[in-house]
Amino acid sequence: MSAIESVRLSGLALLQRVERFFDAFFGAAANPWRHLGALGFYFLWIALATGIYLFIVLDTGIEDIHTAIEYYTHQQWWLGGVIRSLHRYAADGLVLAMLLHLARELLYGRYHSFRWYSWITGVPVLWLVYASGIGGYWLVWDQLGLFSAVASAEWFDWLPIFSDPAARNFQPGILNDRFFSLLVFLHIGIPLLLLLALWVHIQRVSQSDVFPARALGFGTLGMLLALALVKPTVSHGKAELTHLPELLHIDWYYLFIHPLMYATSPAGLWALVGLATLLLLALPLLPHPRQAPLAVVNPPNCNGCRRCFVDCPYGAIAMAPHPDKPGHELARVIPELCASCGICAGACPSSTPFRSVDTLLTGIDMPQQPVGALREEMQRKIAALAGPVKIAVFGCDCAADARRLQGADTAVLNLMCTGLLPPSFVEYALRGGADGVLVSGCREGSCAYRFGTRWTEERLAGRREPHLRPTVPAERLRIHWADGHELSSLKAALEEFRQNLQSFGADEKRLRPYTPRRIAQHG
Ligand code: HEM
Ligand code: SF4
Ligand code: SF4
């Protein structure tokens, strides 16, 4: 393992501890760390809504804008002032959510293979967020806005794009309402471009997480409102083209690039920003694990039920008329979108191990871990179990390593993603000799394939098709989510489960045994 990879994994373990800590207070559904993309969108919506209000009520001429903003900030603080502060703090929140989202995706290693698209389309979003925010400061037309506008112009003047230096526009007599209207136009146009870029950004994730859960949404809005009331946004003095301000209160979320430029040089800042952008764009090209084989449809076993189509986290399945079954559809995998997660195989009704066929072929399968091979492995491992309480564990390659639980009385089947587990396998394991089944995988929001955890939980709880039959005694099934660093918690859950099972009578809450045809034949 390279040094960089081990740093990433240590950072990931730390992040997952933080996420788990927040889970305890917010629950996974409203944990801000697990929904940073949705929070980013939320901040953007607030900034857009408040921005539209401010645009309507403010007089945006160069002479009047500062006075108008001062009026709303101080005289009408209870409405205009609050909305101005909401606009400013939502814009800051957008930067914070975006940078944390980027760092999180990086630590989770989500920047290569099929994710190259989401990663690469995220990079222009960074630029557009900064361009939108910095432009907003100019419109206030106070000393900070003037400083930012001049600094930005000096920065761009280093590029050979303008015949006359743009910084020259900021002189008495030259700067007029027309130029200022251009700034207003930019501050409306760039956020619209940002929206478009974000729409492109989420094109390859299905059912994307763009709205935070209600509790997270209300909590965030409440926090912004509290900030707006406790520390309202105020302007500096009106911009004076003739003399420089002595003291400026910089918004470090956006305007840090100006002090950075004066501490280096315009060329130095271009080099830094260019290098960072190139580095981000090049990340997907760095050596990374090869993409695993893609899902494969088996037409005779597909009846067009659409479950794989609905459950695929990356919109990688399309439905077309079935060539051999009139009136039915057939699933088709779109190769460039497939993440090789196997969640579709777990969704397919043909994946049930109870089918009395020697070779279990399902409607959609993963060549590297076919459902038929899983059934055979399970039969073999459960048949070999010994001891008073026999447990079958379904683990996940991306989560706490369940293989470490393997023992004489514990059969472990590790899946590429827990979402590959057809729920009927739980019943099959119980009827085939296991006293209990433990299902494990990444925590909600940590799943490498977005929905593996959620769909599995819903299928096992009977809220999603294919569901676990209600006749399966709940006492004999344990679900325990544990991220990579939580092996000890998984071990403890297994022990506790074993003790619970031990306390039952031998036949209490037990399903009628099922003898698979092949075992009967061979045995
Ligand atoms: C304000 C800016 C951004 C917003 C609002 C945003 C929003 C989102 C959303 C809503 C998703 C879908 C999450 C889901 O449903 O699971 C997503 C995915 C993703 N974003 Fe962003 N994003 C932003 C910037 C970025 C940046 C700058 C990068 C990196 C350069 C990035 C990288 C990714 C990646 C790699 C995914 C795919 C995650 C996966 O496949 O599980 N995003 N983003
Ligand atoms: S393997 Fe995953 S990404 Fe590919 S088609 Fe199946 S569910 Fe979709
Ligand atoms: S879940 Fe199975 S049967 Fe249903 S459409 Fe997909 S491949 Fe076909």
Image: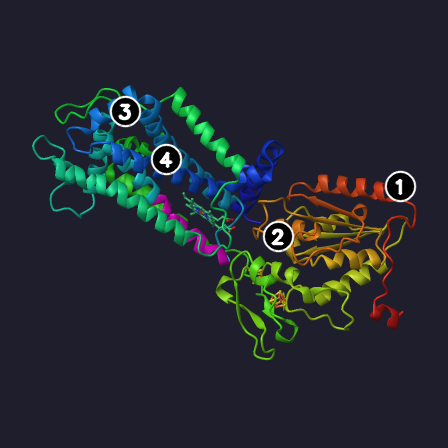
Marks 4/3: CA distance?
19 Å
Q: Amino acid at mark 1?
A: Ser
Marks 4/1: CA distance?
57 Å
Residue 296 in magenta? no
Q: Residue 350's spot in the image, x, y percent?
A: 69, 67
Q: Most extreme residue toward the right, as rendered? A: 506
Number of other residues with Cα within 10 Å of mark 1, as a class: few under 14, some 14 to 19, many 20 or more: few
Marks 3/1: CA distance?
69 Å
Number of other residues with Cα within 10 Å of mark 3, as a class: few under 14, some 14 to 19, many 20 or more: many
Q: Residue 56's spot in the image, x, y percent?
A: 26, 36
Classify mark 1: helix, strand or loop. Answer: loop
Q: Is residue 387 above or below residue 133?
A: below
**Closer mark to the observer between disc 3 and disc 2:** 3
Q: Which residue is mark 1?
A: 503
Number of other residues with Cα within 10 Å of mark 2, as a class: few under 14, some 14 to 19, many 20 or more: many
Q: Residue 413's spot in the image, x, y percent?
A: 73, 56
Q: On residue 72, which mark appears?
A: 3
Please report the bounds of the magenta region as a residue range. Answer: 114-127
Q: Which residue is mark 4?
A: 91
Q: Dots 4 and 2: beta carbons under 8 Å? A: no
Looking at this view, is 239 or 4 the one in front? 239
